[in-house]
Image: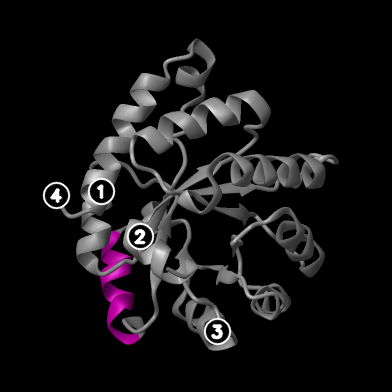
Amino acid sequence: MDTRDFIEKHKLIVVCRKIYDDELKRLAAALFKGGVRLMEVTLDQRDPDCISKTSRAIRMLNELYGDALLVGAGTVLNEGQVDVAFQAGAKYIVSPNYHPGVIKRTKELGLVSIPGGMTPTEILAAHDCGADFVKLFPATTLGFKYIQDILAPISHVKLIATAGVNEENFRQYLDLGFVGAGVSGRLTDRKLIAIGDFEELTRRAEVFCSIARGE
């Protein structure tokens, strides 16, 4: 199964920010146990070591799970960062914005492109540039009324909702026709990680994955 089909099948991408090494290993184990099969490791653009930290994290997850867990790089802002993510083994590239150079370089390397967009103009520009999916960001801030209003003319674009997606609204996004969602806070809860309550994160993952399966 290629990466695009894998994303459409599993629907849930867990977005990991500033989580590395043993914490990330334990988090990934808990989420994988709960059914998660897609994880995005973001580049913390304020951290001067973000390239090495993100690359190390992607390599570690690939070594641990192989093709059972597809790992992508997030908050990718330029072509050089696409190259770094590719070398680390990322299978898809996620950005908060529409950047033609990032999309083109992603496709040149045979990776799946998921740029961000908010307006119909941004969404269609990204799609026309070759994006495989477009991340509607920030989805919850925009609201369902806005989403319903813009869906008709862009219904051919495969959208992924990101920012504010939770157990209560995930199904609604899927029912509206979204391919999937990027989820962070509920599945990377720092308070739970700090106290070592990975069982609760597994439980939450099971709920999200059940929704993704249409159950």
Q: Report whether residue 150 is seen.
A: yes
User: Could you tell me residue 126's position as x and y percent?
Assistant: 55, 79
Q: Are marks 3 and 2 in contact (CB under 8 Å)?
A: no
Q: What residue type is labelled 4?
A: Glu
Q: Which residue is located at x 54 percent, y 78 percent?
A: 131
Residues at marks 3 and 4, CA–CA distance in whole angstroms: 34 Å
Q: Is residue 13 left or right of residue 177?
A: right
- Which of label 3 and label 2 is nearer to you? 2
Task: Assign a secondary structure to mark 1.
Answer: loop
Rendering coords of residue 91 (x, y %)? 59, 61
Whether residue 214 is in magenta: the answer is no
The numbered mark, 3 or 2, whose residue comes first in the sequence reads: 3
Q: How far apart are marks 1 and 4 (CA)?
A: 14 Å
Amino acid type, label 3? Ala
Q: Name the residue under label 3.
A: 125
In the picture, residue 87 is in which quadrant?
Answer: bottom right
**Extent of the magenta region:** 144-153
Furthest toward the left, the residue is 215
Q: How crowded is mark 4: few (under 14 residues within 10 Å), some or many (20 or more)?
A: few
Question: Mark 2 or mark 4: which is in front?
Answer: 4
Which residue in the protein does label 4 denote? 215
Is 68 situated above or below 93?
Answer: above
Figure quadrant of the N terminus: bottom left
Query: What kind of element bears circle 2?
Result: strand
**Left or right: 138 as drawn, with respect to 47:** left
Q: Which sits in the foreground, 16 or 123?
A: 16
Question: Residue beneath label 1, please?
Answer: 169
